[in-house]
């Protein structure tokens, strides 16, 4: 693949300096003449360098003064409130989450879409498609009869081996025999819940939480007890402890400790230790959904919640769906003291998974290319999150608040004046823009004035126009003056091809 143009290479150099803090907000970039001398480039290239950084939101031009590092508008926004933790939560009875989600999905499909900002998903070009295809081809060359024989019950041995080795990086010491391959993390969560609870039992979950989890609980006939959750540190340990003292029928606790969906919070190690100890003390199984930890902006992923487990009380579930290959649906579970029960439930429910995708993914993950891919993915997502947050801060009305997470695919946005996100969803759908209203993420209506925005696609003209239109919709809804002028939403351009990074 061809290298990016020289002006883009030089722009990336200065963007790296801004990210590293070497260039701070309001610092002046070198003048055009200085850039020409320093890099041996033409005036045209120097102008392209500065204008590309300006168009991407890194710098701003000041008349007769030059280009200056831009102070992100998001920094001026107030942080989101922390949840109250001094009252026992009301047990959330089923209020039709299936119906809400089904209606959302059906209506989204019926309307032609120019832009879908509702799904926590990365753009296809962010994933190492060619490298994975080559790995799958090598596997079939090495074992041409693989597709004609049944796969091992627990999963491909080399795949489980690489997962066990990589678990050391997050503080877990597990054997490949302790790992069971699943059809994504959603099957792992189903198995974990069925292993420790029965229909009618109560499961404590974060609030807000991923609507897919509420669907799972409803489909299993279990009750969701929603525990207040901080946008910064995750589930409130104090509120959970109060709930355990108040209710004697909590059969499990299920949390997403890293980049919680939809908040984006990352649980500190001290909280993980307290949570693991609290659940062990009360003999309540603790289920960890660790789908997003590799997307945290850090050289190594944070410690797994299971690394604080001393008795086999933590069930660890994870997948490659968000970080490597959305199309492969590869997940796994290590279930501690419930391992044998989970393996039998898996056998009864879906038997063994197909082996080819596990073998190909395991082969790729065993190379340095996997970590290079993860670094590149985190860098791209960080830039996209920051651009999206800046756009929302610039074009939504005052009073809007954003929780900007340290990684991941999404932003959690609080609307001003407690405006209903369902109203915004309806109006945006008429413009062929799809957002995820906050009502999807709880069995109650208390998150109606929030919405989740996807940042998985490269920021461009179509996304910028859609966010500007969303800002206008919000402003129109809270203004007594009525609708204002509309910004046109162009057709979605083809996403740019990234520089090679998987070789």
Image (cartoon, rainbow, N blue to C red):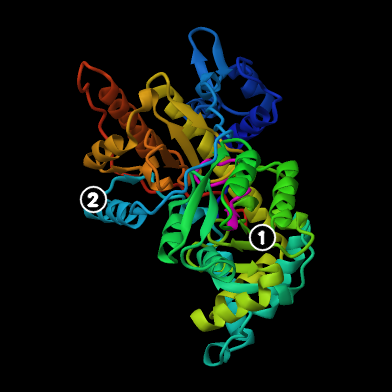
Magenta region, main secondary structure: loop
Does 258 lie within the magenta span?
yes
Say above or below: 2 vs 404: below
Q: Nearer the viewer, residue 503 or 451?
A: 451
In depth, the one of 332 and 123 nearer the eye is: 332
Q: Quadrant of the C terminus?
A: bottom right
Provide residue 62's location: percent of width, then percent of height: 50, 11
Residue 245: image location, x then y, percent = 62, 46
Total count of labels: 2
Camera-nearest residue between 374 and 56: 374
Q: Is residue 276 left or right of residue 462?
A: right
Secondary structure, mark 2, is loop
- Label annotation for residue 370: 1
Locate residue 12: give its quadrant. Answer: top right
Look at the image and tell me in which quarter the N terminus lies. bottom right
Q: Position of residue 28 (x, y in %)?
A: 62, 15
Residue 221 in view (yes/no): yes
Residue on which disc 2 sits: 112
Q: Quadrant of residue 16?
A: top right
Q: Which residues are magenta?
A: 251-265
């Amino acid at each position: 693949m061809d290298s990016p143009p020289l002006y883009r290479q030089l722009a990336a150099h200065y963007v790296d300096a801004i990210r590293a803090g070497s260039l701070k907000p309001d610092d002046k970039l070198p003048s055009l003449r200085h850039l020409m001398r320093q890099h041996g480039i033409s005036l045209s290239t120097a102008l392209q360098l500065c204008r590309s950084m300006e168009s991407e939101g890194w710098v701003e031009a000041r008349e007769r003064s030059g280009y200056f590092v831009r102070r992100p508008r998001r920094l001026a926004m107030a942080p989101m409130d922390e949840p109250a933790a001094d009252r026992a939560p009301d047990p959330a009875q089923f209020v039709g989450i299936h119906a809400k989600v089904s209606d959302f999905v059906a209506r989204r499909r019926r309307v032609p879409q120019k832009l879908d900002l509702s799904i926590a998903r990365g753009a296809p070009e962010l994933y190492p498609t060619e490298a994975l295809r080559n790995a799958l081809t090598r596997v079939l060359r090495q074992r041409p009869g693989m597709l004609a024989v049944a796969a091992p019950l627990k999963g491909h041995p080399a795949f489980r081996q690489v997962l066990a080795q990589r678990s050391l990086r997050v503080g877990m010491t597990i054997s490949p025999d302790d790992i069971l391959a699943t059809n994504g993390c959603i099957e792992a969560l189903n198995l974990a819940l069925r292993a420790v609870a029965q229909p009618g039992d109560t499961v404590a979950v974060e609030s807000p939480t991923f609507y897919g989890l509420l669907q799972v609980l409803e489909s299993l006939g279990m009750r969701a007890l929603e525990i207040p959750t901080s946008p910064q540190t995750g589930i409130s340990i104090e509120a959970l402890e109060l709930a355990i003292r108040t209710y004697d029928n909590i059969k499990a606790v299920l949390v997403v400790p890293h980049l919680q969906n939809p908040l984006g919070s990352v649980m500190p190690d001290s909280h993980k230790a307290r949570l693991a100890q609290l659940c062990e003390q009360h003999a309540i199984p603790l289920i960890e959904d660790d789908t997003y930890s590799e997307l945290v902006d850090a050289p190594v992923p944070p410690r797994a919640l299971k690394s604080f487990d001393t008795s086999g009380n933590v069930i660890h579930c994870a997948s490659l769906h968000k970080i490597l290959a959305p199309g492969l649906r590869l997940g796994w579970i290590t279930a501690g003291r419930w391992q044998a029960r989970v393996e039998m439930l898996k056998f009864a429910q879906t038997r063994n998974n197909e082996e080819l995708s596990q073998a190909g993914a395991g082969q790729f993950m065993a190379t340095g290319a996997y970590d290079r891919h993860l670094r590149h993915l985190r860098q791209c997502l960080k830039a996209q999150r920051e651009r999206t947050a800046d756009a929302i801060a610039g074009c939504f009305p005052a009073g809007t608040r954003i929780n900007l997470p340290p990684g991941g695919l999404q932003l959690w946005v609080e609307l001003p004046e407690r405006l209903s996100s369902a109203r915004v969803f309806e109006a945006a759908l008429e413009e062929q823009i799809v957002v995820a209203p906050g009502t999807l993420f709880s069995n109650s209506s208390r998150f109606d004035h929030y919405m989740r925005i996807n940042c998985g696609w490269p920021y461009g003209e179509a996304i910028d126009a859609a966010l500007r239109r969303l800002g206008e919709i919000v402003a129109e809804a809270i203004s007594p003056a009525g609708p204002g002028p509309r910004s046109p939403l162009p057709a979605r351009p083809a996403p740019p091809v990234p520089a090679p990074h998987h070789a």
